[in-house]
Amino acid sequence: MPVAKGQIRQIISENNITSVADVYSLLRDSFKDILQELMEAEMDATLGYGKNQKGDIQSDNKRNGHSTKTLKSQYGEFQIGVPRDRNGEFEPKLVPKYQRDISGIEEKAISLYARGMSTRDIHNQLKDLYGVELSAEMVSKITDRILPQVKEWQPPLHAIYPFVFMDCIHYKVREDGRILSRAAYIMLGVTTEGYKDIPSIMAGANETSKFWLGMLNDLKNRGVKDVLFFCVDGLPGFKEAISAVYPQAQIQRCVIHMLRNSFKYVNYSDLKKFSSDFKAVYNAPNETAAWSELEAVREKWGKKYPYAISNWENNWEDVSPFFQFSDNIRRIMYTTNIIEALNRQYRKVTKTKSVFPSGQSLEKMLYLARENITKNGRRDTVDGIRY
């Protein structure tokens, strides 16, 4: 509730406020007094009566003095008297037991870290904004406190996902004095209502089908009974891993990746014409027409660029499922752009980390980034990326 102008003028007059320093000092002292009175009010609520107001209330419990507690706040350190009761029933909610920092600085540090700021930059930012000295090492220790949450992170999942996209982002991590490449394995699902979901993120060794198999089993164990389509790139063993866990699911290779793989065999002088001819393949109304168009492309370009055509022929079983659907469904299936847009968000918050000091720090960053991307319960449909 705002303070009336008349009350403000009275406060200024009574406290002889003539500078910003005087205002800060008043706020600091008032903050302590207000906090003390709020804790006294909490004790009143616990006992059922105010100080010296027991009256006819029947109770064997009563006040039993105070214990001194030193608190850290945005106004510096100060001592407060925590009320005690004889029966030990009082549990303060305003300043819980064992909590000594009420400045909110720790939450601010974690929030800035989740947005990709380095520990040194966070130190400078907090010092400039709040005058708080928080070393880079302390920032790291503060963010380490969320590690148990990272290990226990299990977002609620749906029983059925029409589409699940699987992709990796690669990072450099320092381990045992060496800099190694590590992969962040990311699954993005589309629910039956058309919303995007992030059922799983894990950090591991360079991308392997064996690691994906472990993630798929974890997905199954956590309640995902069925996936209609998996949209993936061309990692060897991907198909076998998916079939082992979800044998009824169809696998859709990313058409965009297939095109890129084919175009790398084509001379630049022919690329424009070749890509124009190939549009007839992936824009065909059905699979029969698409195969016919592929044969036409092979007849025209096959002798000059055999590998560009055989790339499609050898993977046709995993490229063709989307031909049975309408254009709006095809737009979801034929490219991994949906998950690539999500990956851009991860890269945005991790761009300050050329090398992560440990695999644990990578997992911590991915978790915080995920929480930041999906904060406030915002949900995104497949029609556009709005994270």
Image: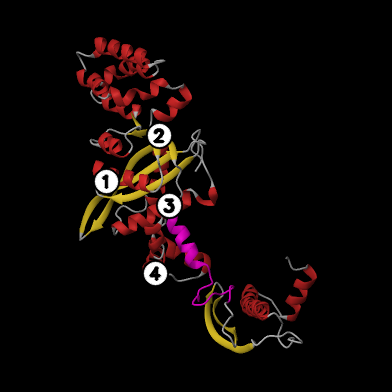
Q: Is residue 106 magenta?
A: yes
Quote the CA–CA distance across marks 4 and 3.
20 Å
Mark 4 or 2: the one toward you? 2
On screen, residue 205 versus residue 143, left or right, reads left
Mark 2 or 1: the one toward you? 1
**Residue type marked 4:** Met
Question: Is residue 44 among the parts visible in the rendering?
Answer: yes
How dense is the environment of label 3, judged by Cα within 10 Å: few (below 14), some, or many (20 and up)?
Answer: many
The residue to which callout 4 is attached is 138
Magenta-highlighted residues: 92-115
Contact? badges 4 and 1 (CB < 8 Å): no
The residue to which callout 2 is attached is 337
Point out residue 307 in the picture as x, y percentages from the top left corner: 21, 21
The residue to which callout 3 is attached is 369
**Numbered circle sitting on residue 211:** 1
Q: Is residue 201 magenta?
A: no
Point out residue 141 in the picture as x, y percentages from the top left corner: 38, 67
Residue furthest to the right: 6
